[in-house]
């Protein structure tokens, strides 16, 4: 696995994402995307949200383009979302689950990338369990290739962040007066990180990160957020409550939380607990849900839930990002 | 696996399959489809059967539609058949082998369905080893989604039933004067059930179900058929002989049938044995065949065999069903 | 696995590849393809090579056609290359990894083929670890089906051979004055065999096959080539150096080559060693590379390397072959 050890830090990702003319070429992280760009992307995505009961929105703006979904980490939902987004824009889509073949053969990530690039793949959608892989790839590809991060270790999941922002904007209309509470395994959550970065850029009123102490983030990482370990305190008057998926294996290692029931009692979002939040608060989850662990099943299916709206917005956001980086190529 | 335990019986599937205006919305079972509808579907399918040596028939009637092949149970042939049927109608096709990812993550079937629905999937083709899953899903999806059963436990495989009916009609021209013999593991065969239901609706002359006693169906289940355990009696003067696939593991558990040779000697369809049937009798098999177990290899490749014609009809029937449920959506 | 034992030798593949009118119907081997046809195929492929920095070349010449990628042996790269080649010509592409399902079910190769043929698949791209499988299939399919060999045991990999020829022609302009050195596990290499056959037909000046003695080919197999076991002798004044992938397991069984370091020291192509070759020599590799074993990593990324050009040519060559066999069908 040549060179994976050599990943530099992620700090220089910010500039890496843009072409010389300032247009978005890669989407690696929501860090470094300014408010105007985020708003533009959300506005673009709105155009791809179908009307209630309507057919999927389609265009031919990526006809002749080739997208490779390069998933080093398996995913049914995110892969399907990117697959449909590409097909609905008229692109050719190549799905590669690379863990099953090339890595076994010892082929390095870069050789896979160079191979796809030589096959005239225009956009590579990359998911990997290791931090730094999407930026590492972006640094090495030719000028005519764009990299989209579809989930990177614990670090970043920018299209998930965008779909969360779009969902909140649709439900709440603005960010400045909102209190958003993100609940669960913050430490290991790329979903929380990307949502937090985007919310901060858009000027959210208040952001709370609530987790068991052992799963709290480094306080210096997101200084704009408050860190709490008491769920009731975190939910009080919140307008948006975002539950995170937790790995069951992690629960057993938590002090005073020996099992699932204790986790739900302490950090699960229930209808009853939502009484503490604002009267019109919404609840979100990136999926796939562990019903009865992070979130009460009935709450997930209630009118307060924005969970399926998040999924619908996921396709729209990915279409908007694919179209934007594709336009950036035309400029080159 | 929330709610799978709670599957109600399949009796109310019948009404569930139709829209308020009486058009076919889901295809879950051939039970409840009347003769006129079955004949319509077979006539529709005829339009998609290519002329001998001709190119595949294509249309754009599903352009803009999205089909998800949601296979909780693996299948190469049925998946390929639905995949090609969808593509040849101009649809976008998403292939999901869900056993490999989402279920491992503990995501319930319904959450998968809600996710696909939010991604604007119009038609979900579902295959599952458990009885009741397709109807359970059909009861929960939004108005704009259709469910097609692509194989459901031992219960139902309606597109297989339709392709069997189409093949028999092409070879024999009618059903009223026919004797059809289905041979093998009737008890566990969704193929036998769907064929028997369709043949009964279309008014087949005589239907015989032949199996080792331990693999016979409940006599009350298909009262319109005769149940036999002697193959020679079953084949006598039959016009159509349909061999079923048997799982090799089951053979060892049969009284007096310790191995494959004994099974073939007692229940295998051979050229010699076909002498008992009508002079122009045809032999069918749903595939994949265990040559030399259920059927003699030379017989499978003989002019009496309709086996590849069944496969060709499979694509045509699936195109007809996809087009019909898609038209039903337009009415909504 | 019925009939696999019965594969006849490959000698009669030559005639099998052509239709009655002499047009190319199957591509099983470069043996038997004459110089005019090879040059035609390379010329066709040139039309599909995009200009530097340009978009992928596309056409609709296979619209309405169905291609099945039938990979009994896994491959990410070759499968992706054929998949993109088919899509860029407008064909419907069906990807089947058959090892994961049908073979487990005991379905014979032929039954899989008959099934795909009945589904109106026009072109089957077959990869298999056993010698003789593509020709065996070609002998059994209907007149309207073409078989393309995408890798056959140690025997043949004709589209790889064509892309190697195209790359050499692009870099060197001609073959008559060239010395080509192929280095590595010649004995087990279908890549070496196909390249050698094509180079011989095109009248290469000199062809050298260099390997450890235990991995040398039968001297009677390619009498037009010289067989060497000393790498320095083999590289001297060579214009083209082609490194082959070696399976790591094989290295340990080689006399005097106990490990990877020894293999690289004796048979690895390095920048230093390339000093022995002609001043403008190029280096090639079929991929995926074991960097530091067959080839020095820096050399693979140097201007002397034609490795990514080979990959780009792979798509172009496959498009040319797909189009040609498709045209052959029109004649029938």
Image: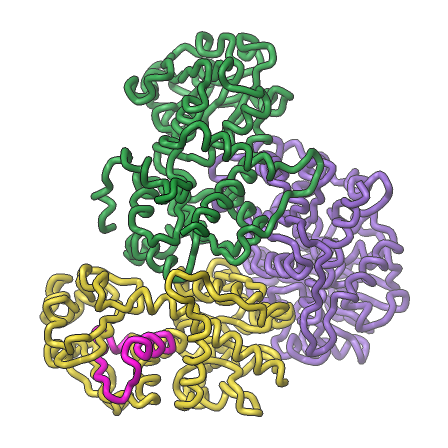
Chain colours: A yellow, B green, C purple
In the foreground, B120 or A31 = B120
Q: Residue B171: x percent and y percent?
A: 59, 22
Q: What percent of the width, then of the height, locates residue A289?
A: 27, 62
Q: In the figure, C228 relative to B75: above or below?
A: below
At 54% from the left and 29% from the top, the residue drawn is: B166
Residue C214 seen in the current view: no
Vertical relation: C93 (above or below) B293: below
Q: Indicate whether A30 appears above or below C330.
A: below
Q: Quadrant of residue B219?
A: top left
- Quadrant hosting residue B259: top left
Q: Depth check: C249 or A120 in front?
A: A120
Left-right relation of C8 to A131:
right
Is A167 a magenta residue?
A: yes
Which x, y percent locates residue C134? 68, 43
Along the viewing direction, whichever of B161 and B267 lies nearer the viewer: B161
- The verdict on residue A63 being magenta is no
Q: Residue C225: where, in percent of width, then height?
A: 82, 57
- Per the rendered image, the range of residues in magenta is A161-188
* Apparent side of residue C160 relative to residue B310 in the rendered image (left or right): right
| Closer-to-camera residue (C5/A321) | A321
Measuring 41% from the left and 86% from the top, which residue is drawn there? A9
Residue C197 seen in render? yes
């Amino acid at each position: 696995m040549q060179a994976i050890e050599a990943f530099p830090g992620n700090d220089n990702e910010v500039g890496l994402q843009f072409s010389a003319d300032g247009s978005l070429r890669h989407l690696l992280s929501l860090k470094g995307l300014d408010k105007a760009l985020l708003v533009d992307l959300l506005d673009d995505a709105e155009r791809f949200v179908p009307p209630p009961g309507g057919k999927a929105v389609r265009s031919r703006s990526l006809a002749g383009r080739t997208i490779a979904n390069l998933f080093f980490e398996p995913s049914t939902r995110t892969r399907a979302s990117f697959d449909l987004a590409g097909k609905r824009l008229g692109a050719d889509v190549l799905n590669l689950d690379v863990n099953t073949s090339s890595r076994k053969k010892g082929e390095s990530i870069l050789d896979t990338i160079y191979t796809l690039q030589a096959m005239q793949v225009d956009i590579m959608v990359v998911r990997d369990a290791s931090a730094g892989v999407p930026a590492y790839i972006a640094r090495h590809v030719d000028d005519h290739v764009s990299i989209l991060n579809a989930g990177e270790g614990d670090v970043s999941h920018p299209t998930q962040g965008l779909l969360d922002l779009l969902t909140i904007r649709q439900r709440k209309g603005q960010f400045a007066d909102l209190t958003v509470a993100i609940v669960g395994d913050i430490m290991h959550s790329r979903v929380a990180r990307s949502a937090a970065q985007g919310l901060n850029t858009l000027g959210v009123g208040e952001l709370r990160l609530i987790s068991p102490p052992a799963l709290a983030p480094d306080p210096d990482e997101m200084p704009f957020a408050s860190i709490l370990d008491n769920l009731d305190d975190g939910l009080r008057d919140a307008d948006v409550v975002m539950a995170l998926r937790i790995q069951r294996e992690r629960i057993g290692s938590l002090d005073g939380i020996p099992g699932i029931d204790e986790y739900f009692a302490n950090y699960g979002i229930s209808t009853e607990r939502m009484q503490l939040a604002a009267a019109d608060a919404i609840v979100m989850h990136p999926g796939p849900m562990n019903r009865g662990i992070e979130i009460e099943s009935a709450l997930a299916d209630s009118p307060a839930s924005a969970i399926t709206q998040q999924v619908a917005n996921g396709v729209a956001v990915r279409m908007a990002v694919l179209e934007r980086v594709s336009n950036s190529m035309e400029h080159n």
